[in-house]
Amino acid sequence: NAGVTQTPKFQVLKTGQSMTLQCAQDMNHNSMYWYRQDPGMGLRLIYYSASEGTTDKGEVPNGYNVSRLNKREFSLRLESAAPSQTSVYFCASSEAARQGQSPLHFGNGTRLTVT
Amino acid sequence: GESVGLHLPTLSVQEGDNSIINCAYSNSASDYFIWYKQESGKGPQFIIDIRSNMDKRQGQRVTVLLNKTVKHLSLQIAATQPGDSAVYFCAENPYNQGGKLIFGQGTELSVKP
C-alpha cells in the first residue's frame, strides 16, 4: 500500500519549458489536491478535485492546469514554466469529497527548479 | 518546553521530556483541526485531528488540546524521541470558506539526545 505517489521527485526546467507532474493514490479516496510549499509561506492550494470528473481552482492557480484522469490519478501541468514556479509541489488525497471532513494524506513531493 | 506558534518557530527539547507545540488559529468559524509532522525532504504526515465539539483527543504518545475561547490548539508529545525531530504545523478548516484548509507555517522541533 503505497499511499500517494508522486513523480518525478526532482526536476529542473528552463523558463518557458513545459512539464506534467504525476500523482496517483491507491487509497480509493474521492478528493485529490495539488499544493505548493515555499519557505515562509506554508502550503498553498493550487487546484483540487472533489471527485472524478471535477476540478476547481484553489488559492494560486495561475500558470497551472490539472487533469483528474480517473479516481486514482491527478496530474498538474505547467505549460510555460517561470522562475516564480520554483517550489516543492505536493499532491494529497482525502476520503471525503469536501475538505474539513477527513485528513489529507500527502505524497513526498516534487522539487522543481525553474532557471 | 513550549512554543508559541509563528513567533517562536524553533523548539528544542531533551530526549525523554514532553514537548508542547502551540498553534493560534485565526478563524472562529473553524470546526476541524489537523496536526501534521514534516520531516526534511518528505511530505506532511498526518498525526491527529480534532473537531470543534471536542476539547481533547489522544493518540499514541500525542494529545491535542483545543481551546475555542482563545482560538488555541496545542500538540503534546510525551517522552519525546530523536525521531520526533521535524517541523510540526496545524491546519484549520473554516466551515464558511468552502471547506479550504488553512495551514500554519509550523514549528521546528529539535530533540537533543
Image (cartoon, rainbow, N blue to C red):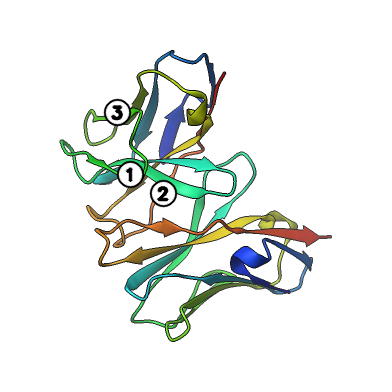
Please tell me which residue is depicted at 40% across the width and 15% down the height of the picture.
Answer: A18
Foreground tag (2 vs 1): 2
Q: Are marks 3 and 2 in contact (CB under 8 Å)?
A: no
Of mark 3 and mark 2, the one earlier in the sequence is 3
- The part of the image, by quadrant, that contains residue A26 is top left
- The part of the image, by quadrant, that contains residue A113 is top right
User: Residue A105's mark?
Assistant: 2
Frontmost residue, B87 versus A95: B87
- What is the x, y in percent for residue B71? 46, 78
Of mark 3 and mark 1, the one earlier in the sequence is 1
Per the image, the residue denoted by label 1 is A27
Per the image, the residue denoted by label 3 is A65
Q: Are marks 3 and 1 on the same chain?
A: yes
- What is the x, y in percent for residue A74? 30, 32
- What is the x, y in percent for residue B52? 35, 77
- Distance in Å between CA atoms under marks 3 and 1: 24 Å
Q: Is residue B56 visible?
A: yes
* Element on which disc 3 rests: strand
Q: Are marks 2 and 1 in contact (CB under 8 Å)?
A: yes
